[in-house]
Amino acid sequence: MSDPIEFDEFYATLASARDGNREKVSELEWMLAEYEHANESKGPFDELGQIFCHIGVMEMYSYTGVEQLNYIYSMENNIWDYLKQREGKSAQNALVKTMVKHAKEHSLTNKIANKWGSNEEDLAENINRLAEYIADGIIDILID
């Protein structure tokens, strides 16, 4: 990837929302709405990463069937084992696959590269690593 990207603010907000901070829950909802379209992104990988943050949290809600982060965080290992069996893949794998699938279905590497005047091949070559990076951060925060 060309420029280093960080999502510390997103992860900190996600962790605070997970811990029940109502103000941070509202902030996270706003942040996810902004990240869905990544209009405030600072570059091509930041844009794709913001979109992946949004998709990752939405997929976690879908995967678990729960939209309460504190409840997701409190789920025990046997529930995660059941979900993995039911879905045929781990939560981490589900998040990554959904991110990459969305990017391909919507030609995001092409659109983002054209928008930023960047190399589409560079984006395409790093899409899986970026999805794994975002998914790992979400998993680390939401699965105890």
Image (cartoon, grey):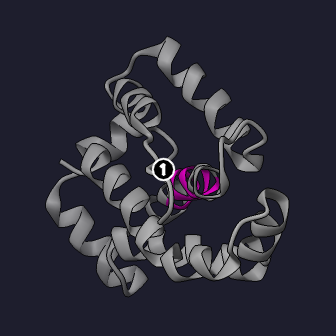
Q: Give the structural element (helix, strand or loop) at label 1.
A: loop
Task: Identify which residue, 75 or 96, lies in the foreground.
Answer: 96
Q: Is residue 133 left or right of residue 98?
A: left
Q: Where is 94 relative to 45, above or below? A: below
Asked which quadrant contains residue 83, the reply is bottom left
Circle 1 residue = 66
User: Outermost residue toward the bottom?
Assistant: 88
- Residue 33, horizontal then vertical, whole percent: 71, 38
Residue at x 55%, y 29% (from the top left corner):
28
Asked which quadrant contains residue 114, the reply is bottom right
Task: Identify which residue, 4 or 14, lies in the foreground.
Answer: 4
- Residue 92, horizontal then vertical, whole percent: 35, 69
- Residue 48, horizontal then vertical, whole percent: 63, 59
Residue at x 33%, y 51% (from the top left corner):
137
Q: Is residue 52 magenta?
A: yes
Q: Main SS type for the magenta part? A: helix
Q: How many marks?
A: 1
Q: Is residue 23 left or right of residue 120?
A: left
Q: Is residue 86 left or right of residue 107?
A: left
Residue at x 48%, y 19% (from the top left corner):
24
* Residue type marked 1: Val
Magenta region: which residues? 51-59
